[in-house]
Amino acid sequence: MNKSSPAKILIVDDTAANIALLTEMLENKGYQISAAGDGEKAIKIAQHITPDLILLDIMMPGMDGFETCRHLKKQETTKGIPVIFISAKTEVDDLVTGFSVGGVDYINKPFHEDEVNARITNQLQIQQLNQQLATSELHMRQLLINYQYQSERLQQIVDHVVDGIIEITTLGNIQFANPAVEKLFGYTTKELENINFSELLAEPFASLYGKFFETSLLEGEQGYFSGNKIFEITAKRKNGSEFPIDFSFMKISVGKEMYLAVIHDITTHKDKEEKFRSLSNIDPLTNLANRRYFEEVFAKEWLSSRRNNKPIAFIMIDIDCFKQFNDTYGHQAGDDCLTQVSAALKNNIKRPSDIVARIGGEEFAILLPDTSEEGVFKIAEQLRTDIQALQIPHSGSEHQVVTISLGIAITKVGEQYSSSDMLYQMADEALYEAKHSGRNCYTIAADTTNSNPQSEK
Ligand SMILES: [Mg+2]
């Protein structure tokens, strides 16, 4: 039954006059009427049309009303249809039997139109409410199933996601942590329960977190804990070791207010970044520092040497007649030569503060902070002899082997050089001089020492 179509009523009575009377009464009210003269027919029709209500005479030849009702209540298609008995006399026995076989009400003969209408309307309303109830119950069940599914799905995500998800009370204590948190921090779930979240943060973030909870009620937002942003901060494991994380922290309200922290371990990312950084600092052929990195270090060492009033030595190195070498032996041999020379240079540069770099094709630079003049000359001479000792054949060279020339510039304590560029330029000029002095030698820039060009042939 629904609102768009009239309710269907099946009248069952062995007296045609009763059917006629009831039909007239009910059709006037807009109901759709069917009729049956005995119980068997009534059952068939009911199964066929599934009426919204059945008016059933008790006293009928053959199958009486009670028996008919029992049959209707056994059938799946008809058992839900309300049955109102039609009775000539309402005796207690009849009432009891009628209700016991599944009837819902009685209408007495002779019929009073108002009573008939009232009882029918009443039952149809109850029927309609029952149907609505059944529908909403079904709806509720579907909602519940849906909710359970969603809940399980979310649980699965929270359990398997690699990011740490932490629920925090308004007092700053951990209320829930997903399994990823155990893995990331080395605490068990039980240990995590009710410890303060600051335990998972390294300084200064742990202190800032504490401050946030002291002041949040008054000041609201504070830096890292302001929500909706991702910050790169440092976390702390149970064993005290620290690691970098992407961190976001937000206030949420699920029934009650709480905070949610999401933690993404970026150790791998940071390692890659570091590796990339170091790769971008290295000359791929020789594995020495490249020019970019050398200049970065040079600038830093220059400032530091001035600030601390310490000398700084700069040696510029060039492989002698390298163009001819390449022309004679080819570029592969040229690369091999560069690699061997680089290794020999590096072999003599031992202190962490010293740096050797390839700054051009066959050009190298060495920085020796805070080294005595004698020390610098000793290193320069060692480099020169070491390269010659490699005995790399070079038919275009006077020495028949690969050699290098070196130009040295040293800042002196107390002397103020205007810029690092000046030191660079002086080393370059000294190198030029070494080339003109016959190569395979080192020369010291005139401004920086009194020494004369050095060579050993
Ligand atoms: Mg009868």
Image (cartoon, helix red, strand yellow):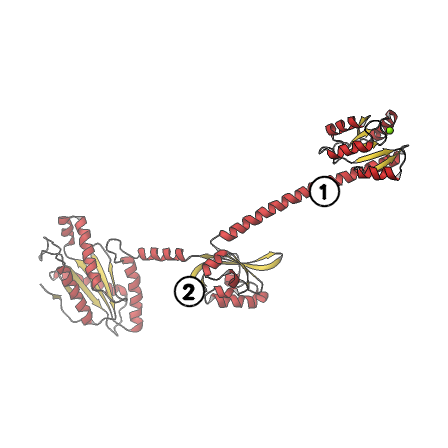
Q: Position of residue 271 (x, y in %)?
A: 37, 57
Q: Position of residue 4 (x, y in %)?
A: 74, 33
- Figure quadrant of residue 104: top right
Q: Position of residue 285 (x, y in %)?
A: 24, 53
Alpha-carbon neighbours of circle 2 within 10 Å: few (<14), some, or many (≥20)? few
Check disc 2 and give the amino acid type. Answer: Ser
Nearer-the-camera pick, 129 or 282: 129
Question: Which residue is under mark 2?
Answer: 241
Q: Position of residue 319 (x, y in %)?
A: 17, 57
Side (left or right) of 49 relative to 182 = right
Question: Which residue is under mark 1?
Answer: 133
Q: Which mark is residue 257?
A: none
SS at mark 2?
loop
Residue in the picture at 60% in, 47% down = 147
Nearer-the-camera pick, 436 or 237: 237
In this view, the residue farthest toward the bottom is 414
Residues under numbered marks 1 and 2 in contact, where contact means CB atoms less than 8 Å apart? no
- Figure quadrant of residue 256: bottom right
Number of numbered discs:
2
- Figure quadrant of residue 35: top right
Q: Quadrant of the C terminus?
A: bottom left
Quarter for ligand 1?
A: top right
Check disc 1 and give the amino acid type. Answer: Leu
